[in-house]
Image (spheres, rainbow, N blue to C red):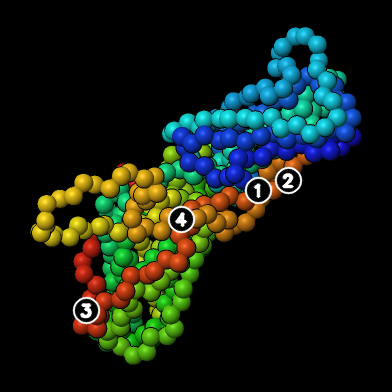
């Protein structure tokens, strides 16, 4: 671009996912091939939520609702925008200008790119040129709200729902009753929901199959507080084939893998995100309708940590001095800490109405979320236990307090 060969924001250690309270370090790198006159080079640290009246490209749309979380600017070289004095010159060569921002420790919802809005964070650098358009570069990154399912006991317990339907004439046909249970109420992406069910078919209708589905519900709200849009999307599913005959049928610990998704989000006034698991029994027969059960699910950003029960062993010798402290000790022994995976929805265009044509950076962005690799689904109960209906479990809304 004329005198500038490259202009980019570079994160330290190429890290582009952050939790609230972390420090963002990096550099703004620029290479000029001839002398460049400028007012200064500055970087903007910004985070906001926007909701739009319609979907699609948001570059020329006015938000119906918005919320700003971060808005900071630092001058890295030369003059600040309102500073008087001579304009400096940048000689030909390569330059690296370091920056450092400390993110707030709270009130930062997770990065989300949705159908009718987004929560988005970025660093945008400017080469401020006198009497000419600025040259800009923009780097969007992921912020992940700390949603720890392990601190909410109700999310670690099984969740259960029951439903019953009568088909045909009650005097000739019995009911179809279904009890569904999940092993927990809270999960991290990469883990699987283990679904068990007890189906008792005393009706004359045939069960054609079972669908186990995970849905994401996104609610977009305008400034008046009125819900603008409620979008429900299927994000995961498994099927089970026809269940033949009447009587009792069991499905034990069927895994429903959770893809890379944003955690349950209630902290943003513009966008709310929740999840639910649906268990649908498809029924065939005259006048029959499918039987459906729903269990709320909380998606967290911290993986499940099984409780560690200390062994009760009597000491056979006097206690020894503890080993010296080392920083290599893991905070959760035996727990596989998550890596990060790209959002299942893929990338989106992130140019907006404030981005000029002289922007020297990628215009797409894909959020990254914590993701548990090689998750092991809990073992199914013994054959004796499998002949029993799932044990009673609390039916409750899967949401953090």
Residue 173 image point, x, y percent: 28, 85
Residue at image location 32% in from the left, 44% down from the top: 325
**Label 3 to label 4, Cα distance in Å?**
33 Å
Give the residue furthest to the bottom: 245
First in sequence: mark 4 vs mark 1: 4
Please, what secondary structure does the residue beneath circle 4 have? loop
* Residue on which the image places disc 3: 385
Query: Which corner quadrant of the image does residue 206 belong to?
Result: bottom left
Q: Which mark is residue 362?
A: 2
Q: Residue 335 location in percent, x, y? A: 37, 58
Whole-number angstrom distance, CA of label 4 to CA of label 2? 27 Å
- The residue wearing badge 1 is 365
Quarter the C terminus occupies: top left
Query: Closer to the observer: label 2 or label 3?
Result: 2
Residue 124, quarter of picture: top right
Give the vertical position of 392 relative to 2 (above or below): below
User: Does residue 395 appear left or right of residue 137 in this picture?
Assistant: left
Q: Which residue is mark 4?
A: 338
Callout 3: helix, strand or loop? helix
Q: Mark 1 packing: few (<14 Cα in 10 Å), some, or many (20+)? A: some
Of pointers 3 and 1, the one earlier in the residue sequence: 1
Q: Is residue 320 left or right of residue 21?
A: left
């Amino acid at each position: 671009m004329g005198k500038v060969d490259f202009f980019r924001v570079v994160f330290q250690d190429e890290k582009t996912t952050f939790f609230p309270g972390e420090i963002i370090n990096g550099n703004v790198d620029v290479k000029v091939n001839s002398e460049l006159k400028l007012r200064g080079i500055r970087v903007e640290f910004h985070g906001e939520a926007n909701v739009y009246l319609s979907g699609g490209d948001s570059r020329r749309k006015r938000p119906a609702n918005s919320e700003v979380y971060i808005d900071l600017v630092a001058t890295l070289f030369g003059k600040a925008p309102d500073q008087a004095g001579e304009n400096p010159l940048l000689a030909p060569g390569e330059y690296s200008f370091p920056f450092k921002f400390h993110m707030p420790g709270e009130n930062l919802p997770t990065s989300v790119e949705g159908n009718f809005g987004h929560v988005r964070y970025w660093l945008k650098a400017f080469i401020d040129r006198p009497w000419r358009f600025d040259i800009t570069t923009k780097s969007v990154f992921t912020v992940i709200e700390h949603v720890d399912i392990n601190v909410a006991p109700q999310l670690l317990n099984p969740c259960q729902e029951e439903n019953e339907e009568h088909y045909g004439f009650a005097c000739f046909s019995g009911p179809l009753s279904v009890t569904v249970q999940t092993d927990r109420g809270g999960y991290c992406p990469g883990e699987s929901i283990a679904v068990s069910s007890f189906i008792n078919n005393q009706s004359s209708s045939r069960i054609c199959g079972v669908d186990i589905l995970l849905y994401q519900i996104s609610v977009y709200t305008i400034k008046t507080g009125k819900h603008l849009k409620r979008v429900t999307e299927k994000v995961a599913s498994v099927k089970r084939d026809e269940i033949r005959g009447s009587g009792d049928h069991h499905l034990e610990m069927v895994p429903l893998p959770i893809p890379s998704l944003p955690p349950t989000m209630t902290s943003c006034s513009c966008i709310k995100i929740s999840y639910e698991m649906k268990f649908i029994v498809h029924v065939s027969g005259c006048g029959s309708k499918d039987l459906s059960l729903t269990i709320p699910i909380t998606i967290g950003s911290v993986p499940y940590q099984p409780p560690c029960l200390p062994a009760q062993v009597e000491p056979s010798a006097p206690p020894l001095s503890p080993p010296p402290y080392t920083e290599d000790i893991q905070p959760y022994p035996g727990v596989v800490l998550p890596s990060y995976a790209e959002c299942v929805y893929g990338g989106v265009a992130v140019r907006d109405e404030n981005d000029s044509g002289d922007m020297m950076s990628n215009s797409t962005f894909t959020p990254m979320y914590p993701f548990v690799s090689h998750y092991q689904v809990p073992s199914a109960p013994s054959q004796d236990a499998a002949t029993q209906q799932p044990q009673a479990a609390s039916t409750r809304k899967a949401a953090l307090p």
